[in-house]
């Protein structure tokens, strides 16, 4: 397992570096206002994708291990369900929630939501492979595709428009989807196991995971939703840079959480408990130290990298970095229950943790 963890961290580090380079180029080319429009589109797409998942990928991984059944039929049915859900939620978003500045982008939002939703499903479902070779390869290649496409646009036209960046993310997501889905469907089709795994077999586990996911969506996006509704696109762009930069430190606990779930879902609970304790103890102090160092450098770091027009991103970046470390370590601990088939306990903890946040939101209103 430690070899898989090391490989996954290396891949995640490469992904972070490439993604960071791309985010800097994005901010420099677009400026705060267009960066805000771009970020708001991606946020809406991410929300639609998250609401469309229903915990189906995690249910597939867990029950494939537990029941030893063939998942080809389940993968097809889940894809259809997620696709229909993404289209319906996109339509509801247009009618009730879409800001006026984004109405002209509705078609691309719908298309990107559909592709992203299916890609997210197959990306999470690919964790069924314990060594995560294929998952890690695609994870590293996707930001590289973004940079290559951006370089191609730049050679053709130095003044890159907003639409070009949207097209780039659409093409790279489609690239990831095609490869991940082909690999997983081919694996299940060629499996010697004949007994099919059905939606009903994973529904109980998946819905508990989905409940936890919905609360996580609320906690992680309530700030951005409020800013999108009460602020300007420029303010959203500034906040988007702070948020995106703060997520870099969370890549390590996120990667280890993913490896632990992939390795132990439906398997030995005693080894799972030991792995979670070991990695949490090993990560806690180093991550907190790195967090403090980054915060101390932030007032110099952000203007140098992104430009003086992003100086107002410094303060939210400080708070978001602290939140990222704490939530990342918390999610690592929660794998003790998710991978052992008890996601309901994580759901209960999430429900309790949202009470103060809901109170603050209503108090501010």
Image (tube, rainbow, N blue to C red):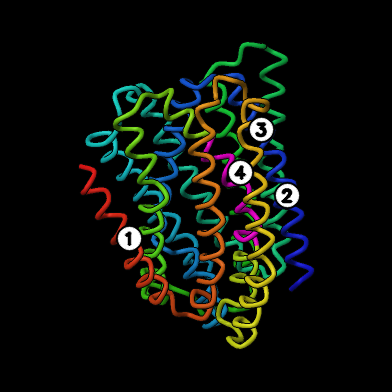
Q: Which residue is mark 4?
A: 295
Looking at the image, which residue is at 69% across and 63% down?
Answer: 132
**Label 3: which secondary element:** helix
- The reply to whether discs 1 and 4 touch (Cβ–Cβ < 8 Å) is no
Q: CA distance from mark 3 to mark 4?
A: 9 Å
Please say if 66 is above or below 233: below
Q: Nearest to the eye among marks 1 and 2: give it.
A: 1
Q: Are marks 1 and 3 in contact (CB under 8 Å)?
A: no
**Camera-nearest label, 3 or 2:** 3
Q: How many C-alpha atoms fall within 10 Å of the one at disc 1: few (<14), some, or many (≥20)?
A: some
Q: Secondary structure at mark 2?
A: helix
Residue at image mark 2: 13
The residue that mark 3 highlights is: 301
Identity of the residue furthest to the front in this view? 296
- Can you tell which quarter of the image residue 17 is in? top right
Q: Is residue 68 above or below residue 118?
A: below
Residue annotated with mark 1: 354
**For the magenta stretch, what is the residue range?**
242-255
Is residue 123 part of the magenta span, yes or no?
no
The residue drawn where x is 30% and y is 59% is 356
Q: In the rendered view, would you say 186 is above or below 49?
A: below
Which is nearer the N-term, disc 1 or disc 3? Answer: 3
Look at the numbered disc 4 and give the secondary structure of its residue.
helix
Q: Nearer the viewer, residue 217 or 72?
A: 217
Work out how far the residue at label 1 is from the one at label 3, CA to CA, in angstroms. Answer: 33 Å
């Amino acid at each position: 397992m430690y070899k898989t963890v090391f490989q996954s961290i290396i891949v995640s580090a490469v992904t972070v570096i490439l993604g960071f380079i791309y985010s800097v180029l994005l901010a420099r080319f677009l400026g705060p206002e267009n960066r805000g429009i771009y970020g708001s589109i991606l946020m809406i797409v991410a929300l639609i994708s998250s609401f469309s998942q229903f915990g189906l990928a995690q249910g597939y991984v867990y029950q494939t291990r537990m029941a030893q059944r063939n998942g080809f039929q389940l993968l097809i049915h889940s894809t259809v369900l997620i696709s229909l859900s993404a289209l319906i939620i996109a339509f509801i978003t247009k009618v009730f929630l879409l800001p006026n500045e984004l109405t002209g982008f509705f078609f691309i939002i719908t298309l990107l939501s559909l592709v992203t939703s299916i890609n997210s499903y197959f990306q999470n479902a690919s964790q069924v492979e314990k060594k995560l070779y294929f998952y890690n390869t695609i994870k590293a290649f996707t930001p590289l595709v973004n940079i290559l496409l951006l370089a191609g646009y730049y050679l053709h036209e130095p003044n890159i428009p907003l639409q070009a960046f949207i097209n780039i993310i659409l093409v790279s997501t489609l690239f990831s989807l095609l490869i991940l889905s082909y690999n997983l469907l081919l694996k299940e089709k060629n499996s010697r196991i004949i007994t099919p795994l059905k939606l009903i077999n994973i529904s109980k586990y998946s819905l508990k995971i989905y409940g936890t996911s919905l609360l996580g969506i609320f906690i992680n996006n309530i700030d951005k939703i409020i800013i999108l509704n009460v602020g300007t696109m420029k303010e959203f762009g500034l906040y988007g840079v702070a948020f995106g930069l703060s997520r870099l430190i969370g890549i390590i606990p996120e990667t280890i959480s993913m490896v632990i779930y992939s390795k132990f879902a439906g398997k030995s609970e005693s080894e799972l408990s030991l792995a979670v304790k070991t990695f949490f103890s090993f990560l806690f102090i180093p991550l907190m130290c790195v967090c403090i160092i980054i915060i101390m450098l932030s007032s110099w770091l952000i203007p140098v990298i992104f430009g003086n027009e992003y100086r107002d991103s410094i303060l939210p970046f400080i708070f978001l970095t602290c939140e990222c470390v704490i939530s990342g370590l918390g999610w690592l601990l929660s794998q003790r229950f998710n991978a052992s088939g008890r996601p309901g306990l994580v759901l209960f903890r999430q429900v309790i943790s949202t009470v103060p946040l809901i109170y603050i939101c209503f108090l501010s209103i």
